[in-house]
Image (tube, rainbow, N blue to C red):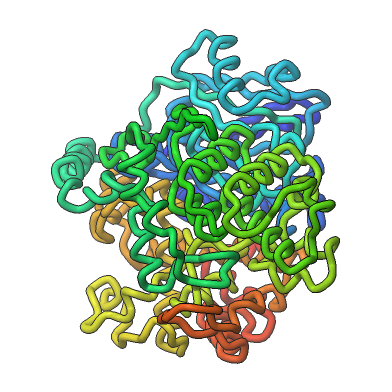
Amino acid sequence: MNGYTGKILKVDLTTGKIEIEEPTELFYRRYLGGAGIIGYYLLKDIPKGADPLGPDNVLVMAGGAMTGLPIAGGGRNAVGAKSPLSGGYGEADAGGFFGAELRRAGFDAVVVRGKAEQPVYLWIHDGEVEIRPASHLWGMTTLACQEAVRAELGEKQARLAMIGPGGEKLVRYACIINDLKHAAGRTGMGAVMGSKNLKCIAARGKASVPVADPDAFKALAKSMVDTWKDKAWNMHLLGTDGGLTGLSARGALPTRNFQDGQFAGAEKIGGEAMRDTILVDTGGCFACPVHCKRVVKVDDSDYQVDPLYGGPEYETVGAFGSNCGVDDLRAVAKANELCNAYGVDTITAGMAVSFAMECFENGLLTLADTGGLDLRFGNAAAMVDLTRMICVREGLGDLLAEGPTRAAQVIGQGAEQFVIDVKKQPFPMHECRTRHGQALGYAVSPTGADHMHNFWDEGLAREPLGEGFLGLGVYEATPKTELNAHKVRAYTFDVNLRWVHNQIGCCMFIPWSRDEIINILQTVTGWKVNLWELMKAGERCVTLARAFNMREGLTRADDVLPPRMRLPHVSGGLNEKPVLPEVLDEAVTLFYGMMGWDPQTGVPTPAKLHELDIAWVVNA
């Protein structure tokens, strides 16, 4: 078949058994890849009620039809398992080179179950698979691990997806790092990997994924190479952090644990400041000309930051910077380096620190609790120290490594009011009181609060509406801070389609149009795919994730926002208003109905499962 290797690797670390599945072409057309394949295997292979950190959990790494093909945006792979943070559907995706190398090594996905008796790693090369001992790698940072494995294999170009000490120590939001600086950051996939005694997966391959129409594909790839500077130059120049100062000016920059939306030090940590101070290079992912990644270096009396670990993205700068009240970009870069070296999600770590800071300022934590750290907002050195403590589970960091929700339960004294999360996953750095469609997205996201499969209200607020919405049959503009039936409908259509980027392994930052995405898939696979089929594929993917959550005990009561979203910011002239619980609740009911889920419980109905051709889920 075209667009796929046609092989899925299954490894049982308990028994050492290695199998290769060869799904039919219709399997790939139905699930596409990425989160679609992940949802399938999580429901099929994980027993109901399995411990997320036990051997019955299953870890899935999956690319899509674009992953590993020489075209802009084709450097991404998804990772999924039952989340140790939420207890439900866990999924994250990452860029870099590992996903591409895995496909070139012969496999569309890897499914890992069981637990090795001693630490191991997988070596996948040109269709061959080995389980190798890794006790000598245990405890290493990601950089040390990568250097050691490449030397051991005698393969300098081997690409690694790995965990650091954070994953080994089961930090509940530990991540999986590709190539030192690309993180599958959210939902604790690194902790799952660590619970299996799996240090890394190394891949190297020389095969190419077959393409149905090579000439048409090359023309499409060249079109982006020729035009990206006109469409994405600012992304190259400033990276994802380029919009930080604008968000602050609009009152939409998370500040001091989401108490405020404007940060006085925004100009000191924005993309322009990074470019003019600590930036030494740009980096990119497989086959991508944009090079939006930051590479920074700090070497002074306060901090040393190794450029091999890349540099902070917007999410990281927001989490460790404005949301902790810190305007020292060097300190933010150091916190980012620590998280990349130890394999910990920067968003959740930053939110854990900001949560602790608010607890400290309100007397719920004392110097005795913090090990002497003065955890007031704005203390850059304390922020860095606490981040390190989280990564190694030291002192207060050991508690915060469980996530803010669990930490608040131990701290007590009303600490729950300072937790900003959904389904135990802290918010990313996007203020949903300025975007109420995004607020709905946080509430109903299967992974907990997430921005990657979410809604951006600005597009729906423009008059006249653009073809992006008109082409989906959405005809009425709606203000950003309004949440009505029109917006719920726009959210449902738009986000179902947004999941397809994950499923096909395409970066959302590459300015491919919707028609170009369809054209790419047609030239790669030979299928006559259309918009309707892709929307159904996204809807199928979301419904699989929803079914997994329902099976694992999550309910409508988990599709809510934290209490702080009901309140306005504490200061500043800001263009936001609270998200009223009764309005959100009505929107959730409408969303369930539009998705074909039970309007009261959110359980996918048998009729919807049949309509999506996944009726097998009823018995999963």
Front-lying residue, 320 or 46: 320
- The image quarter in which residue 417 lies: bottom right
Percent coordinates x, y for residue 252 in the rendering: 43, 71
Residue 200 vertical placement versus 417 (above, below): above
At x 59%, y 10%, the residue is 152
Number of labels in the image equals 0
At x 72%, y 23%, the residue is 138
At x 46%, y 62%, the residue is 538
| Residue 489 visible in this rendered orientation of the protein | no
Percent coordinates x, y for residue 120 in the rendering: 71, 23
Residue 3 vertical placement versus 500 (above, below): above
Percent coordinates x, y for residue 219 in the rendering: 16, 41
Pick the quarter of the image with the N terminus: top left
Front-lying residue, 109 or 115: 115
Residue 175 vertical placement versus 468 (above, below): above
Front-lying residue, 52 or 320: 320
Is 198 placed left or right of 474 in the picture?
right
| Residue 283 visible in this rendered orientation of the protein | yes
Is 163 placed left or right of 409 in the picture?
left
Pick the quarter of the image with the C terminus: bottom right
At x 58%, y 63%, the residue is 427
Is 553 placed left or right of 594 in the picture?
right
Is 169 placed left or right of 470 in the picture?
right
Percent coordinates x, y for residue 121 in the rendering: 66, 24
